[in-house]
Image (tube, rainbow, N blue to C red):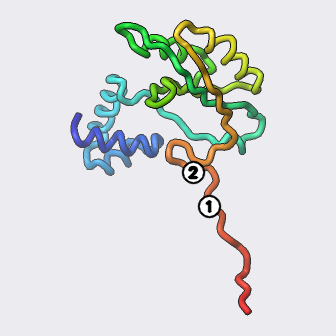
């Protein structure tokens, strides 16, 4: 991977909607070269997808529950944690799975319509897997920052200063 490709990745990670012409100017190459590099990065699965960060608390009509679940598992011989992680990330309600250091092995992020739906997932799908030893569920109450984006910008103090 060359320096220009790294620059392109950094720019696209910050803003995936940058037009190719602007991106070409930013990295100082032609539009055709940028298009070729982006296509190559997509084909190599280095660029996996383009996404948006949505503040669902402000979007009407979309209610739901999100939870982070710490999972302690028994790793399997020769595949380690990969096999159980793959079984977990194939559930449609699972949004992310991370291998972690510390007291728990995996961190699983899920979304459901209700707390009951999340509880059903944990009790009937996740905890019944062979390798899963224990789980701890943390419900997400409010997002302050996600992917480097602050959800509620700082409010300016509009009070008038009163001095004696």
Q: How many marks?
A: 2
Q: Residue 37: x and y, percent?
A: 29, 33
Question: Label 2: how many residues lie within 10 Å, few (<14), some (14-19) or many (20+)?
Answer: few
- Spatial CA span between label 1 and label 2: 9 Å
Which quadrant is the C terminus positioned in? bottom right
95 up-or-down from 121: above or below: below
Q: Residue 74: x and y, percent?
A: 48, 13
Left or right: residue 27 versus residue 18 is left
Which residue is nearer to you in this view: 120 or 73?
Answer: 73
- The residue shown at (27%, 43%) is 30
Q: Residue 2: x and y, percent?
A: 22, 37
17 up-or-down from 62: above or below: below
- The residue shown at (50%, 47%) is 148
Q: Residue furthest front?
A: 103
Which residue is nearer to you in this view: 124 or 8?
Answer: 124
Left or right: residue 107 versus residue 63 is left
* Among the 4 quarters of the image, the one containing residue 162: bottom right
Name the secondary structure under disc 1: loop
Question: Which residue is identified by label 2?
Answer: 150
50 up-or-down from 23: above or below: above
Name the secondary structure under disc 2: strand
- The residue shown at (51%, 42%) is 147
Question: Which label was assigned to residue 67?
Answer: none
Which quadrant is the N terminus positioned in? top left
**Disc 1 + disc 2, Cβ < 8 Å:** yes
Question: Label 1: how many residues lie within 10 Å, few (<14), some (14-19) or many (20+)?
Answer: few
Q: Residue furthest bottom?
A: 164
Q: Residue 104: x and y, percent?
A: 51, 26
- The residue shown at (56%, 15%) is 133
Question: Which label was assigned to residue 154?
Answer: 1
């Amino acid at each position: 991977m060359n320096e220009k490709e790294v620059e392109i990745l950094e720019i696209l990670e910050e803003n995936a909607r940058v037009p190719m012409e602007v991106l070409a100017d930013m990295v100082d190459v032609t539009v055709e070269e940028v298009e070729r590099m982006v296509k190559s990065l997509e084909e190599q699965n280095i660029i996996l997808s383009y996404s948006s960060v949505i503040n669902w608390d402000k979007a009407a009509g979309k209610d739901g529950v999100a939870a982070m679940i710490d999972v302690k598992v028994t790793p399997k011989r020769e595949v380690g944690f990969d096999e159980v992680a793959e079984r977990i990330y194939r559930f449609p309600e699972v949004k992310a799975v991370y291998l972690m250091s510390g007291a728990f092995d995996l961190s699983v992020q899920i979304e459901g319509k209700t707390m009951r739906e999340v509880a059903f997932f944990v009790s009937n799908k996740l905890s019944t897997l062979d390798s899963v030893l224990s789980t701890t569920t943390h419900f997400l109450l409010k997002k302050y920052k996600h992917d480097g984006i602050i959800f509620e910008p700082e409010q300016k103090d509009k009070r008038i200063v009163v001095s004696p």
